[in-house]
Image (tube, rainbow, N blue to C red):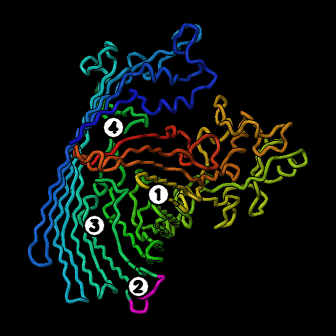
């Protein structure tokens, strides 16, 4: 059983951090009278943090896990397991109107809610019941000294049901007591949700080994999902693997170099249903609103208004599982009395019926369903090296891991549209690819300006100190698309958001009763473009620019500056559009964790029933090395509005009785 209670700032929560980033840094928090100050449409993050009511989020959870193991006969065992989870959420969110004042002490406007009449309470209850049932037979038997057979046959079923109810009122008679019955009835509303999903599987595996040298295994799954229409719910997913322990061959058994040498290969299919909504095979209707939560209505008869409804996404009755094909080849090895370990895998994954959107004529009047007509290829590797040894009383170990995966959208329905900046999909390129102009410095003088303005697509109001971009295809203009089919114009692929070459380094040592462990983690290649409000020095005329622009933009006294000139004019959108100037190398290495411990000698506390006592101090995310500008963490999102990165320090004691 688990009972959790979390509190947050009512109606705003984490946005208080965003408000602190957005607020004008030269505004005072209070006016001369000590009241919360604002002007120009801004809020006040300190007012929100101090004066907002508290939102509460209560979660009660019960988990049950029951298991039966029966030894039926020699080598044959039966396993059954039941997992049940019940979760109840009871949340209350309060939006309180907080007055903000001018410098002279007049109420300017309210934050948290638009006015005292708009102060509101939302109460939500949600109940979730999850069930998981698994049963299988397992057969494991040696036949003589050379043959070993293992087999498994089983089935599984899991389901989840969710029910939610929400009620809301505003216009409370007091801001001292926030009970729903004290709110007004003019704008009260309620909402509800009920949903259910289920999957079921039958699975089997047969494995055979000869002299523990040649190992062969086959398996299959027959999976069904409630997310698909009846005729497309079930699909078979087979697999096969083989391995050869070369180190068990006579010609290597006496080797002083290899303690273990094993070759592996496998092929298998798995099913994917992620991205499919629960009832996409049924034609659903949805209530219409204006995009801001206000429901639209139609007048029917005198004084009658009925809430507007329309088609949701068109039903996709032909959709089915995405089939992921996995091909893997690997090698495992151990050397030097197993002190040095090595493992390497190379894999290729193909999604041959990837769900993608299909373009229809605009006269369709509704959103068409995705279809299984795409193809995505991913290939990569995983490498592990480890060393374990002892020098005198010092035991030490090191493990290095490196992995990489590169994807390519092989087929996307023949569509080849793209734009400058981030593109989630484009045929022939990785998912989430960036396309950008190639930055060619700034316009340096009048002669440079006159020559550059001869290119088509260059703004007429461009001036000295503004950005230049290269005419990559030499067609005499700056454009995203070329005149010929397949010509990308001057847009260039410059990377994707997918991290490449992810690595980790674990170091550990023990001496007498002391121990230490250190873990470094990082990414060797990652492309990032800052988007939104912080993509340029002045995204709006009132927006303060990130600090790294200061002293780095062109003016008459800084003609060798890297960035174009500062301006509030429209030309700033030309200067700071997606280009290689804005490309950020977001590779990094981070000290993820370090822990130092000391274990007391057993003799000190064994008499009182304590077998082991260990004290430790640890730190998490203590530092990182990277080149991301502006004070952002290298793993921050493109908009830069993530919660401030935190470093953790802790100490504790482990007791074993």
User: Mark 4 = which residue?
Assistant: 308
Q: Secondary structure at mark 4?
A: loop
Query: Could you tell which of marks 1 and 2 lies nearer the N-terminus?
Result: 2
The residue to which callout 3 is attached is: 232
The quarter holding residue 434 reads: bottom right
Per the image, label 3 sits on a secondary structure element best described as helix
Q: Is residue 6 left or right of residue 352?
A: left
Whether residue 190 is visible here, answered yes or no, is no
Q: Residue furthest left?
A: 72
The residue closer to the viewer here, 368 or 217, is 217
Start and end of the magenta stretch?
Answer: 249-257
Q: Is residue 35 left or right of residue 367?
A: right
Q: Give the mark nearer the N terminus: 3 vs 1.
A: 3
Q: Is residue 254 highlighted in magenta?
A: yes
Question: What residue is pinned by disc 1?
Answer: 508
| Front in this rendered view, residue 75 or 196 | 75
Q: Residue at x 45, y 48 (%)?
A: 596
Category of crowding for the residue at label 4, using alpha-carbon neighbours closer than 10 angstroms: few (below 14), some (14–19), many (at least 20) = some
- Dot 4 and dot 2 residues touching (CB under 8 Å): no
> Residue at position x 24%, y 54% from top?
197
Residue identifier under label 2: 247
Q: Residue 255, percent across and down?
A: 45, 86
Q: CA distance from mark 3 to mark 2?
A: 46 Å
Looking at the rendered image, the disc whose residue lies closer to the viewer, 1 or 2, is 1
């Amino acid at each position: 059983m688990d009972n959790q209670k979390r509190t947050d700032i009512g109606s705003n929560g984490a946005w208080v951090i965003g408000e602190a980033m957005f607020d004008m840094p030269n505004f005072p928090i209070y006016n001369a009278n000590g009241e919360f100050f604002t002007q120009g449409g801004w809020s006040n993050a300190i007012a929100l943090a101090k004066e907002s009511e508290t939102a509460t989020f209560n979660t009660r959870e019960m988990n049950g896990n029951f298991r039966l193991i029966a030894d039926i006969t020699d080598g044959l065992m039966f396993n059954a397991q039941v997992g049940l989870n019940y979760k109840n959420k009871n949340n209350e969110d309060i939006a309180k109107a907080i007055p903000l004042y001018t410098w002279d002490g007049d109420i300017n406007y309210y934050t948290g809610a638009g006015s005292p009449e708009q102060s509101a309470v939302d109460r939500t209850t949600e109940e979730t019941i999850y069930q998981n049932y698994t049963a299988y037979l397992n057969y494991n038997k040696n036949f003589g000294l050379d043959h070993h057979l293992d087999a498994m046959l089983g089935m599984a079923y899991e389901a989840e049901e969710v029910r939610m109810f929400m009620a809301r009122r505003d216009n409370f008679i007091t801001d001292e007591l926030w009970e729903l019955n004290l709110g007004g009835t003019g704008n009260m509303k309620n909402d509800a949700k009920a949903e259910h999903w289920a999957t079921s599987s039958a699975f089997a595996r047969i494995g055979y080994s000869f002299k523990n040298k040649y190992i062969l295994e086959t398996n299959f799954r027959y999976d069904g999902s409630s997310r698909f229409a009846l005729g497309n719910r079930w699909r078979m997913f087979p697999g096969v693997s083989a391995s050869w322990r070369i180190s068990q061959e006579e010609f290597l058994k006496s080797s002083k170099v290899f303690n273990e040498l094993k070759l592996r290969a496998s092929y298998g299919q798995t099913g994917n249903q992620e991205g499919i909504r629960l009832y996409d095979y049924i034609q659903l209707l949805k209530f219409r609103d204006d995009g801001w939560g206000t429901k639209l209505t139609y007048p029917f008869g005198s004084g009658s208004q009925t809430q507007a409804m329309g088609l949701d996404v068109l039903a996709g009755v032909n959709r089915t599982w995405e089939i992921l094909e996995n091909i893997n080849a690997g090698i495992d090895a151990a050397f030097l009395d197993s002190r040095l370990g090595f493992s390497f895998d190379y894999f290729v994954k193909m999604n041959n019926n990837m769900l993608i959107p299909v373009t229809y004529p605009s006269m369709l009047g509704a959103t068409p369903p995705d279809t299984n007509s795409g193809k995505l290829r991913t290939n990569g590797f995983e490498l592990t090296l480890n060393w374990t040894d002892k020098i005198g009383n010092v035991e030490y170990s090191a493990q290095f891991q490196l992995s990489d995966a590169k994807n390519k959208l092989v087929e996307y329905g023949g569509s080849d549209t793209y734009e400058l900046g981030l593109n989630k999909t484009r045929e022939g390129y990785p998912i989430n690819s960036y396309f950008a102009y190639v930055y060619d410095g700034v316009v340096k003088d009048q002669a440079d300006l006159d020559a550059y303005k001869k290119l088509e697509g260059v703004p007429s109001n461009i001036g000295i100190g503004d950005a230049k971009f290269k005419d990559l295809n030499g067609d005499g203009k700056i454009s995203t698309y070329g005149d010929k089919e397949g010509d990308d114009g001057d847009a260039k692929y410059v990377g994707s958001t997918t991290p490449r070459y992810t690595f980790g380094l674990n170091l550990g040592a023990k001496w007498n009763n002391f121990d230490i462990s250190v873990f470094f983690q990082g990414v060797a290649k990652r492309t990032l473009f800052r988007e939104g409000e912080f993509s340029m020095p002045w995204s709006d005329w009132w927006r303060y620019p990130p600090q790294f622009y200061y002293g780095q933009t062109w003016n008459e006294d800084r003609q060798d500056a890297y960035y174009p000139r500062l301006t509030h004019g429209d030309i700033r959108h030309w200067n700071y559009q997606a280009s290689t100037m804005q490309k950020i190398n977001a590779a990094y290495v981070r000290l993820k964790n370090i822990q130092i411990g000391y274990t007391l000698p057993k003799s000190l506390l064994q008499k009182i029933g304590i077998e082991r006592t260990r004290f430790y101090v640890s730190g998490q995310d203590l530092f990182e090395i990277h080149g991301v500008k502006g004070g952002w963490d290298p793993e921050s999102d493109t908009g830069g509005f993530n919660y401030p990165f935190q470093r953790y320090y802790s100490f504790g004691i482990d007791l074993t009785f």
